[in-house]
Amino acid sequence: PEEDGQQIASYLISFAGQQTRLEIPVLYDQDVRDWHWQSGEAPAPKSLKSVWHGENEMSRRAGKPLRLYITTWTNLLPDLEIDSIVCSSSMANPALFVLAITAE
């Protein structure tokens, strides 16, 4: 709970042939939460969408099911080709990992 609303990471978007970069912040409890469900935790905000629930051997032993969230953003420069996306930690307590990135 002490991390709610805190920026834990960002996606740095670079565009091909451009000096322009966008920073997309990742906020705890708005974009992501701990992937281990904690007993007694407050319900997630409606804007935070869980897209997978499951478990592994460690989570079963601990009695803490797992979950993954989806984060979406709108490309503010859709006419420019994205050259790279870098996930950068803010060195906060949570450890962010990216499972997949898709584009529409």
Image (cartoon, rainbow, N blue to C red):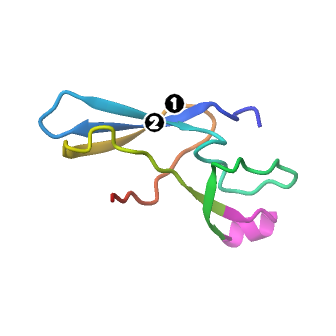
Q: What is the spatial separation of the Cα atoms under label 1 and label 2, in whole angstroms?
A: 8 Å
Q: Is residue 52 magenta?
A: no
Q: What percent of the width, then of the height, locates residue 8?
A: 56, 35
Q: Amino acid at mark 2?
A: Ser
Q: Residue at x 51, y 51 (%)?
A: 71
* Extreme-left residue of the structure: 17
Q: Which mark is residue 4?
A: none
Residue on which disc 1 sits: 90
Magenta segment: does it hold 62?
Answer: yes
Q: Residue at x 77, y 62 (%)?
A: 64
Give the percent coordinates (x, y) of residue 97.
Answer: 50, 51
**Marks 1 and 2 close (CB-CB < 8 Å):** yes
- Which region of the structure is painted magenta? 54-66
* Element at label 1: loop
Which residue is more in the foreground, 41 or 78?
78
Q: Nearer the viewer, residue 80 or 83?
A: 80
Side (left or right) of 46 relative to 7: right
Q: Secondary structure at mark 2?
A: strand
Q: Earlier in the sequence, mark 1 or mark 2?
A: 2
Q: Report x, y in % for residue 52.
A: 61, 67
Residue at image position (62%, 56%) is 49
Q: Which residue is mark 2?
A: 10
**Which amino acid is tagged 1?**
Ser
Looking at the image, the residue that sits furthest to the top is 19
